Image (cartoon, rainbow, N blue to C red):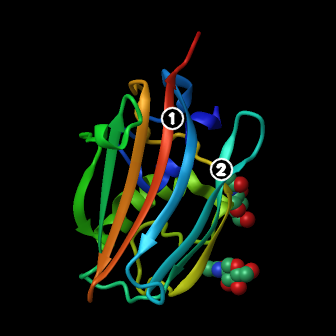
Amino acid sequence: MLSLCIPSLLFVCILANNYNGCAAKTNWEATPLSIGGTTSNPSAMDMNLRIERISRSEFGFSGTFFWNIDMDDSVTVEMRVLSSYSGDESDYKLTPMSIPPQKFIEYINTFYKDLFMPNLGNCTDLPVYETEYVPPWPKATYNFTRCALNGKGLPDYLADGYYKCEAIITAQPDIEVTVAAVLRVRTKMF
Ligand SMILES: *[C@@H]1O[C@H](CO)[C@@H](O)[C@H](O)[C@H]1NC(C)=O
Ligand SMILES: *[C@@H]1O[C@H](CO)[C@@H](O)[C@H](O)[C@H]1NC(C)=O
């Protein structure tokens, strides 16, 4: 079941505001094809992430994320979810599951706390906030060890195809970091 609740979706597919949850109801399963990212300034933010097979049908991701900037109002995050039936680069189109840029601090109090952390659980040492974000957000190298998603917050229905999930974090001055994951989604056979 975890195979469909792809890890990589997480950085991103904080998708829908569908809090009802898990995977048992979904009509699809997904296989992660890649995870990675780019940074405009490796001394401010950087990452080293890879996909790992946990069992025959489960995948997770592991690696580190280096965060070395102050969490102020200038830090924004945007989520883009693109899909492509063929997987050809030129066919990817933005889906409505995308989330426009918002302040990272607002994101911590909503998607991060309600979807991201419950999905990740104990596979990471990212900060946990039970109620509200309390500054500061520590500068650190955060670790991820075979993180898999439990599917909370993911849509019940997805069409066959390739999905690219991108999280774009920006901050002053001129910092832009993109984390991208590509998944192959197939309709489940019952
Ligand atoms: C995560 O760790 C905490 C503290 O060690 C523990 O109480 C909790 O049960 C763990 N949660 C999961 C899902 O393993
Ligand atoms: C991540 O792991 C490294 C090496 O074990 C450790 O030094 C670092 O403190 C960890 N990061 C966090 C946020 O705990």
Mark 1 Cβ inside 8 Å of ligand 1: no
Direction from residue 27 to residue 2 in the image, left or right: right
Q: Amino acid at mark 2?
A: Gly
Whole-percent x, y for residue 59 in the image: 67, 44
Q: Amino acid at mark 1?
A: Arg
Dot 1: what SS? strand
Whole-percent x, y for residue 119 in the image: 55, 51
Q: Residue at x 47, y 35 (%)?
A: 21
Q: As displayed, is residue 118 above or below residue 85?
A: below
Q: Nearer the viewer, residue 110 or 51?
A: 51
Q: Is residue 30 visible?
A: yes
Q: Residue at x 41, y 80 (%)?
A: 134
Q: Quadrant of residue 41?
A: bottom left
Q: Residues within 10 Å of mark 1 (few under 14, many from 20)?
A: many
Count of residue discs = 2
Whole-percent x, y for residue 144 in the image: 64, 65
Whole-percent x, y for residue 89 in the image: 36, 43
Q: Quadrant of residue 92?
A: top left
Q: Residue at x 33, y 46 (%)?
A: 81
Q: Residue at x 23, y 63 (%)?
A: 101
Q: Nearer the viewer, residue 85 or 63?
A: 85
Q: Residues within 10 Å of mark 2 (few under 14, many from 20)?
A: many
Q: As displayed, is residue 119 above or below residue 63?
A: above
Q: Nearer the viewer, residue 108 or 160?
A: 160
| Viewport quadrant of the N terminus | top right
Quadrant of the rendered image holding ligand 2: bottom right
Query: Which residue occupies the extreme top position in the image?
Result: 190
Which residue does the numbered mark 1 point to in the structure image? Answer: 184
